[in-house]
């Protein structure tokens, strides 16, 4: 334990679609380069294959995030909304909010420095689907996103490997196909825009 905080871990897959017109420069610059459009609008979906927080099982649950960032990711001032899988019991719901707000420290602890405002959090039907090269995040009518891997020379996805990206070292390059956000006053469409798929292995509080 760190400062009395419980141990936690999450293994699974993260999918992201943002408004960058070419692949997100934040990945290789580690948030130091501006997004291609000057500001970052994005949705994130995390499917948890295996996870726990202080002994509470998180396996099989999904999490969704809406991100509104005014400039370089590394400069902070993020505005974030969180969507917690409605299948989560009260303990798992609270655990996921602790992890994805950064309060649980560890891998996501940097959120406490980067997020200036949590604009909302709610239980929701967070559905994540995997179909070949495609991934989908569906949160009712609020977020309806679909991305697809960009195919590389060997038939697999184009990859960025061995990075120091906080989400994970190996990132599959993807592109939004049908992607809409309609919530918290945000009306965004990310079809044809940058996307990524990352295997995550996060833990805390150390």
Image (cartoon, rainbow, N blue to C red):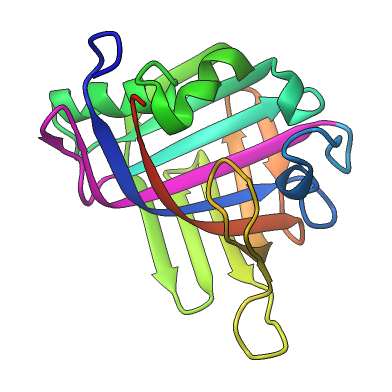
Q: Is residue 139 left or right of residue 20?
A: left
| Above or below 96: residue 61 | below
Q: Nearer the viewer, residue 36 or 41?
A: 36
Q: Is residue 171 above or below residue 101?
A: below
The residue closer to the viewer here, 26 or 40, is: 26
Residue sitting at 85 percent across and 53 percent down?
Answer: 21
Q: Is residue 115 visible?
A: no
- Measured as percent of width and height from the top left, residue 77 is found at 69, 15
Where's the N terminus, which quadrant?
Answer: top left
**Quadrant assignment, res 119:** top right
Picture residue at 54% right of the left edge, 23% below the top: 110
Residue 46 falls inside the magenta stretch: yes
Q: Looking at the magenta stretch, what is its main secondary structure? A: strand
Q: Is residue 43 visible?
A: yes
Q: Where residue 29 sits: x, y (%)?
A: 79, 42
In this rendering, would 114 be left or right of 98?
right
Q: Residue at x 56, y 33 (%)?
A: 66
Task: Say which quarter of the image contains residue 8.
Answer: top left
- Range shown magenta: 39-61
Point out the image quarter for the C terminus: top left
Query: Looking at the picture, how far across and down is residue 143, in whole percent?
Result: 52, 43
140 with respect to 91 (left or right): right
Residue at image coords 25%, 15%: 5
Q: What percent of the width, then of the height, locates residue 78?
A: 65, 20
Magenta-colored stretch includes residue 15: no
């Amino acid at each position: 334990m760190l400062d009395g905080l419980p141990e936690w871990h999450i293994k699974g897959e993260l999918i992201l679609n943002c408004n960058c017109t070419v692949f997100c420069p934040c990945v290789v610059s580690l948030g130091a380069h501006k997004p291609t459009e000057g500001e970052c609008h994005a949705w994130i979906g995390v499917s948890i294959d295996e996870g726990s927080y202080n002994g509470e099982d998180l396996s099989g649950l999904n999490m969704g995030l809406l991100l509104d960032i005014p400039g370089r990711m590394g400069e902070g001032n993020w505005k974030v909304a969180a969507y917690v899988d409605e299948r989560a019991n009260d303990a798992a719901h609270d655990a996921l909010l602790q992890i994805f707000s950064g309060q649980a420290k560890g891998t996501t602890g940097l959120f406490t420095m980067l997020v200036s405002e949590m604009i909302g959090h709610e239980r929701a039907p967070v559905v994540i689907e995997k179909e070949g090269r495609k991934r989908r995040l569906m949160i009712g009518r609020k977020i309806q996103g679909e991305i697809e891997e960009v195919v590389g020379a060997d038939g697999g996805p184009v990859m960025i490997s061995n990075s120091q990206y906080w989400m994970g070292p190996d990132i599959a390059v993807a592109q939004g196909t049908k992607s809409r956000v309609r919530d918290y006053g945000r009306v965004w469409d990310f079809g044809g825009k940058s996307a990524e798929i990352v295997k995550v292995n996060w833990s805390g509080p150390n």
